[in-house]
Image (tube, helix red, strand yellow):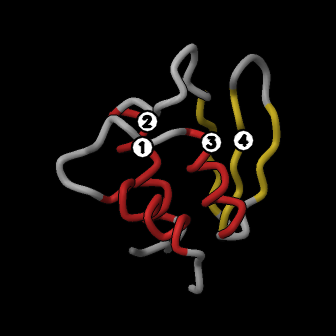
Amino acid sequence: MNLRKKHQKTLEAIFDVPIRSDVAWSEIEKLLLALGAELSEGSDSRVRIYLNGCRAVFHRPHPKKETDKGALKSMRKFLIQARIKV
C-alpha cells in the first residue's frame, strides 16, 4: 500500500491508542478514497462505504468536523475487516 504522507498520518491517527478525538471526518473520507473505497451518499448525514468486499455506513459528524471516539473505533474495526493495516 503506497499512500501519500497525509493519508498515512490519518491512518495512523485512526489506529492510535488511546483513541483520538481530533481526526477530521473529511480527512478520513480522503483516506478511504486513496485506499480505493467507493463512497455513496445515504439519507441525512449518512455515507455508505465499500472497501475490499466490506460494507459499512457511517454518519458524518455535525456541527463539528471532528470524528467522535466511538465512530473512530468503528472505523478502525471496519478497516481491519477490510484488511487495511498501518
Relative to 39, does residue 67 appear above or below in the rendering? above
| Quadrant the N terminus occupies | bottom right
Q: Report the residue at 59% width, 75% height from top.
A: 4
Q: Position of residue 82 (x, y in %)?
A: 54, 67
Labels 2 and 3 touching (C-beta < 8 A): no
Can you tell which of label 4 and label 3 is closer to the viewer? 3
Q: Closer to the N terminus: mark 2 or mark 3? A: 3
Q: Report the residue at 60% width, 28% height from top.
A: 59
Q: Is residue 19 left or right of residue 64?
A: left
Can you tell which of label 3 and label 1 is closer to the viewer? 3
Q: Position of residue 48 (x, y in %)?
A: 72, 41
Does dot 4 land on a helix, a strand or a loop? strand
Q: Report the residue at 67% width, 66% height from top.
A: 53
Labels 2 and 4 touching (C-beta < 8 A): no
Residue topped by disc 3:
26
- Indicate the amino acid at tag 2: Ala
Q: Closer to the N terminus: mark 4 or mark 3? A: 3
As drawn, the label of residue 48 is 4
Labels 3 and 1 touching (C-beta < 8 A): no
- Indicate the amino acid at tag 1: Ser
- Indicate the amino acid at tag 4: Arg
Residue topped by disc 2:
71
> Badge 3: how crowded within 10 Å, few (<14), some, or many (20+)?
some
Residue topped by disc 1:
74
- Indicate the amino acid at tag 3: Ser
Labels 2 and 1 touching (C-beta < 8 A): yes
